Image (spheres, grey):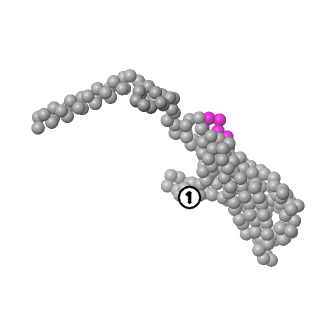
Amino acid sequence: MGKKILASIIIIAVVAIIISLTIFSGNQLSTDFSKIGLANMNITKVSIFNQDALKDSKPLELSIKEIKTGNVDNGTGNISIKFNVFNPNKGTVILESISYNVYSNSTRIASGDIGRRPEGLVDSQDSIFPVIGNGTLLLKDNKIIQTNKDLNMSQIANNINNSNFVVNGSYFYKQTGSFQSTGGEQQFRLNYSHP
């Protein structure tokens, strides 16, 4: 029993000496893994966290891919809108939500939201959209619209080729890397003419 205790003490002492030598040599937080000296490994200057992904970060770029309108019946119509979301950054950006308004001839014909901003750490993450670096994501939304004296969906649907639309609103995004985070709310205003 005494030999086992003595062997345990020696092992603990050796481990403590190795740890103290490592701490005093200053290499414990080095990101240059070539100093470790592991055999058969050719590793040079590896960064643990991608800090470069947050340098000079830019907001997402939105554009309209398509707007379609149509009549459902006498009193209602529908509108379909497709957004292209481009990420000009190196790292992935999280798009939380897009809130938008669609105008035709200065008349608002639709409003909508795509996604939903998380309300905290315990909120669901099912309505956020990751956009990879230098990648594009296509998001679409459909709305049923009630026609009224100011809005004639059949006229807009019949003249879709001649209609000019203005889409404005805001979107919320977040980009994270290691322990930093950038992002926020971005306003947009886009013009769309049917091709």
Q: What residue type is labelled 1?
A: Asp
Q: Can residue 150 be seen in this view?
A: no
- x and y percent of residue 28 in the render? 41, 29
Note whether 50 is above or below 82 in the view shown. above
Q: Quadrant of residue 19?
A: top left
Which of these two is toward me, 31 or 41?
Answer: 41
- x and y percent of residue 112 in the render? 70, 61
The structure residue drawn at horizontal position 80% and vertical position 77%, both measured from the top left corner, is 74
Residue numbers of the magenta segment: 54-58
Note whether 158 is above or below 165 in the view shown. below
Q: In which quarter of the image is residue 195?
A: bottom right
Which residue was labeled with disc 1?
Answer: 126
Task: Classify residue 80 as left or right of residue 155.
Answer: left
Task: Classify residue 174 as left or right of residue 25.
Answer: right
Magenta residues, dominant SS class = loop
Note whether 98 is above or below 44 in the view shown. below
Task: Classify residue 6 as left or right of residue 78.
Answer: left
